[in-house]
Image: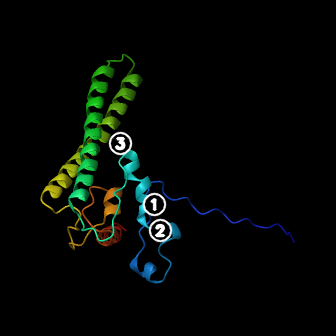
């Protein structure tokens, strides 16, 4: 009989997308739902998420006790975030157009042509996703102007400053979004 010990396998590090796995309400009720890191306040996660990708030095909004939700300072904060994000995406679109014009060559070798077409196709799909994202940013800016930004489109409650900093184009509170994802998973599976 062998006396070797089995070492436990490390837990998976996650899917790398920055999103946490959605748990069903049954699992949450049993107390098995959120891990310690997911149960941590969103402040730490939001600080490292979207705002850090802008690179413009936009600090997370300093929440103050007793402050009204979506006041003018908060609206200005999100308008700045959305505007800078849109500008970055537009600049990327311009760079892509110039890159494709400069790099377009008629290669005599079919393999080289196929490689170039494949690269251009991938680039165009990425730009198409960014075009859709720009449209969502424009919609969020419009909601800011009409005082609808920051409120769930389904139930009308506050989405939350930290959630909006993590996903500035969010239109649903975390509860409604979780329910929607559970329904989508049930329909597709």
Q: Which mark is residue 56?
A: 3
23 or 61, nearer to the observer: 61
Report the residue at 51% width, 66% height from top. 37
Question: x%, y% of residue 34?
Answer: 47, 72
Badge 1 marks a residue whose secondary structure is: helix
Left or right placement of residue 176 versus residue 111 in this view: left
Q: Earlier in the sequence, mark 1 or mark 3?
A: 1
Query: Relative to residue 47, is residue 90 drawn left or right?
Result: left
Q: Tell me which corner region of the image, top left, top right, bottom left or bottom right, holds residue 189.
A: bottom left
Q: Between residues 17 and 141, which one lies in front from this camera angle?
A: 141
Q: Residue furthest top?
A: 108
Mark 2 near mark 1, Cβ–Cβ under 8 Å?
A: yes
CA gap between label 2 and label 1 equals 8 Å
Crowding around mark 2 (Cα neighbors within 10 Å: few <14, some 14 to 19, many 20+) is: few
User: How many labels, in total?
Assistant: 3
Nearer the observer, 131 or 109: 131
Image location (x, y in percent) of residue 9: 66, 63
Q: Which residue is mark 2?
A: 40
**Mark 2 or mark 3: which comes first in sequence?**
2
Q: Which residue is mark 1?
A: 44
Q: Could you say which disc has been placed on residue 97 in the image? A: none
């Amino acid at each position: 009989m062998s006396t070797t010990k089995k070492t436990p396998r490390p837990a998976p590090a996650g899917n790398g997308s920055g999103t946490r796995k959605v748990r069903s309400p049954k699992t949450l009720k049993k107390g098995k739902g959120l891990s310690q890191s997911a149960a941590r306040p969103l402040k730490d996660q939001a600080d490292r998420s979207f705002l850090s990708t802008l690179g413009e030095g936009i600090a997370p909004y300093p929440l103050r006790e007793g402050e009204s939700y979506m006041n003018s300072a908060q609206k200005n904060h999100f308008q700045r975030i959305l505007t800078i994000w849109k500008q970055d995406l537009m600049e990327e679109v311009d760079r892509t157009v110039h890159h494709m014009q400069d790099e377009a060559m008629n290669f005599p070798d079919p393999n080289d042509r196929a490689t170039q077409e494949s690269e251009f196709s991938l680039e165009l799909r990425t730009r198409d996703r960014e075009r859709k994202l720009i449209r969502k940013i424009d919609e969020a800016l419009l909601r800011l102007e009409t005082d609808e930004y920051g409120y769930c489109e389904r139930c009308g409650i506050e989405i939350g400053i930290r959630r909006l900093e993590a996903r500035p184009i969010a239109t649903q509170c975390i509860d409604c979004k979780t329910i929607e994802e559970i329904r989508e998973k049930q329909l597709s599976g």
